[in-house]
Image (cartoon, rainbow, N blue to C red):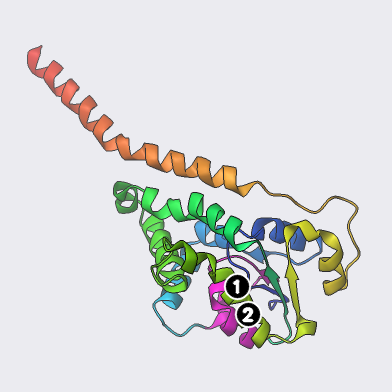
Amino acid sequence: MTLKVIGVGPGRTGTVSMMIALHRLGYGPCHHMQTCIGSRLQSKWFLEAAQGKPMDWKDVFDGFDAAVDWPAAAYYRELIDAFPEAKVIFTYRDPDTWYDSVASTIYQVVPSTPSWVRLIWPRVRLWTEMVNLTIWQNEFEARFEDRAYASAFMTRRLAAVKALVPEDRLLVHAATDGWGPLCEFLGKDIPEEPYPRANEAARIQGAVKGLRALRFVPAVVFGLALFAAVLALSS
């Protein structure tokens, strides 16, 4: 199996909706950041890629029909070269609303993950290291909080992709475009159901709140242990 579709748009541009749509059209499984969350090996591979180590992309994507979202999108040049027959899709969103969405969701995940969680669960530590290096350090050059620079990322990346990919191999697609342009581009019939609309922002923000709440766990455990010790000494 080889990649037939390469999604080169960054996260928070409707990549989950695109993943669901591609699955519905028969391009599955589709690689996504969720793949790395569930796979230590995938996180390890992409951390190594972020560190500049050479990668066998055919091994990384063995078993996948498509790839969307970060971390794969960070290596769009390498993937376009490694899979010359694949169609290329740039999931697009207005740069300003995209920046606000990223800032309030995925940008909060790594700093909200308590250090004790990373210590106890090496897979979590590996994944957060990969995300931090791939996206915030390499893609944004540690300048995400510079709004003017970071929001222009969308425009810069789209221009770079257009300069690299022939028009007949590239689709620029916003979630509001729906099935029509996507199905025409891929040569597929339009499904009867509406185009997917995944509400990932609420899910991610909920996860961030949960991670922040975990910061208090060590203090609670310590307090309970201290209370139990006091009771034992006073009995």
**Which part of the image, by quadrant, shows the C terminus?**
top left
Left/right placement of residue 62 relative to residue 210 reads right
Left/right placement of residue 68 relative to residue 208 reads right
Which image quadrant for residue 13? bottom right
Residue under label 1, please give it.
Answer: 155
Could you say which is closer to the camera, residue 167 or residue 204?
A: 167
Q: Is residue 35 above or below residue 228?
A: below
Residue 34 x %, y % = 57, 57
| Residue at the (58%, 62%) spot, across then down | 11
Q: What is the total number of numbered labels drawn onto the structure image?
A: 2
| Residue at the (41%, 43%) spot, across then down | 211
Does the magenta-highlighted stretch encompass residue 63?
A: yes
**Which part of the image, by quadrant, shows the N terminus?**
bottom right
Could you say which is closer to the camera, residue 52 or residue 228?
A: 52
Q: For the magenta stretch, what is the residue range? A: 56-83
| Residue at the (83%, 60%) spot, across then down | 179
Which image quadrant for residue 176? bottom right
Q: Badge 1: few (under 14), some or many (20 or more) residues near its Cα, within 10 Å?
A: some
> Could you give the CA–CA distance between mark 2 and mark 1, rounded to whole angstroms?
6 Å
The circle drawn on residue 159 is 2
Q: Is residue 186 above or below residue 82?
A: above
Q: Are marks 2 and 1 in contact (CB under 8 Å)?
A: yes
Residue 162 x %, y % = 68, 82
Residue 148 x %, y % = 48, 65
